[in-house]
Amino acid sequence: MTGINEILVLVLLIACILILPRLFKGDSAKKVSSSKKFKNLSTKIRFSIVLTLAYPIVAALYLKPWENNPIVYLSYGVVPVFLIWAVAWIVAGKKKRQ
């Protein structure tokens, strides 16, 4: 039964990823290519993205969650990144409102 459930979950995920965006497709006023989006990123944002990728990798190499307690890795490697981006998102929203 486990194999069938896993296959059905994968089919559901693929359907959601491929079909739902087409159903709820909105007409955007202006389409900007992804290369232009990357050119508009500031140095601060680029550095933050690199740290977002590097910090959990370095934490994983140091804490070795595959050998020991993965909860420690989650609390020291993943959760801080999530919290910092959440705070940055909130601050950016407040600045945009003012």
Image (cartoon, helix red, strand yellow):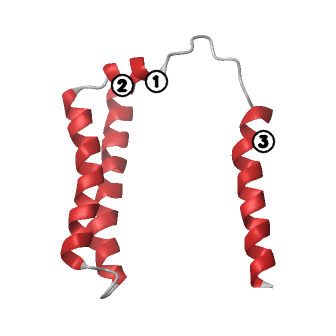
| Residue at figure coordinates x 75%, y 83% from the top left | 2
- Picture coordinates of residue 69, whole percent (x, y): 32, 87
Give the amino acid type for the residue marked by disc 3 in the picture: Ile
| Residue at figure coordinates x 81%, y 76% from the top left | 4
- The answer to whether residue 81 is above or below residue 98 is below
Quick one: label 1, few (<14), some, or many (20+) residues within 10 Å?
Answer: few
Sequence-wise, the earlier of marks 3 and 1 is: 3
Quick one: label 3, few (<14), some, or many (20+) residues within 10 Å?
Answer: few
In which image quadrant can residue 94 be found?
A: top left
Q: Residue 38 carries which label?
A: 2
Q: How far apart are marks 2 and 3 (CA)?
A: 27 Å
Q: Residue 91 carries which label?
A: none
Find numbered disc 3 in the image and state the secondary structure of the residue it sits on.
Answer: loop
In which image quadrant can residue 27 be found?
A: top right
- The answer to whether residue 75 is above or below residue 53 is below
| Residue at figure coordinates x 71%, y 56% from the top left | 13
Residue 59: tell me if it is visible. yes
